[in-house]
Amino acid sequence: MSQAFVLRFTTYAVAAILAVLNALHLAYGLPRLRRRIAAGEVSASLATPFTVAWLYIGLAGVAFSVLLFVSAPGLIAGQGVARNVVLTIALTLIALGVCSYALARKHPGLLFIAVFGIVLLAPIVAFQ
């Protein structure tokens, strides 16, 4: 496999997966959160901050995927700015996954967030 193929495949694959997961996070999770707030499972004083945080996280994830889609051609062409954007997203995902797991040790699935970062980071380190 060529360097360009690996960079293209990993960047577009992670971007697509993040886009789908964050779209589901928003489309399914936000109405579910609102139902739980209405049922009194979430404190009324925390309803607005939880809703805003949920929306913020989902939109940030969609923004990451859009940035990956936009940066992929530049990354493949060897452009430094595109490389830095993808590298920053990769390191952010790794840090987010590790820190999330450290805060909530009963949820090892949170480490899966870091896997996306590793998948993005590995070919950049290997090829560039």
Image (spheres, rainbow, N blue to C red):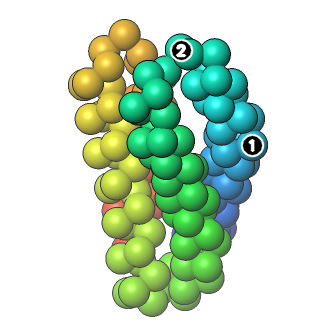
Q: Which mark is residue 41?
A: 2
* Residue located 41% across and 32% down the image: 46
Residue 50 seen in the current view:
yes
> Which residue is rendered at x = 67% and y = 45% of the image?
26
At label 2, the amino acid type is: Glu
In terms of depth relative to the viewer, which is nearer, 36 or 111?
A: 36
* Amino acid, disc 1: Ala
Helix, strand or loop at label 2? It is loop
What residue would you read off at disc 1?
27
**Observer-nearest of 85 and 80:** 85
Q: Is 125 positioned to the left or the right of 12 in the image?
A: left
Q: Position of residue 44 (x, y in %)?
A: 46, 27
Furthest-top residue in view? Answer: 106
Q: Is residue 113 visible?
A: no
Say which residue appears at 38% left-offset and 87% top-offset: 80
Q: Which numbered disc flags the more N-terminal residue, 2 or 1? A: 1
Vertical relation: 94 (above or below) 73 = above
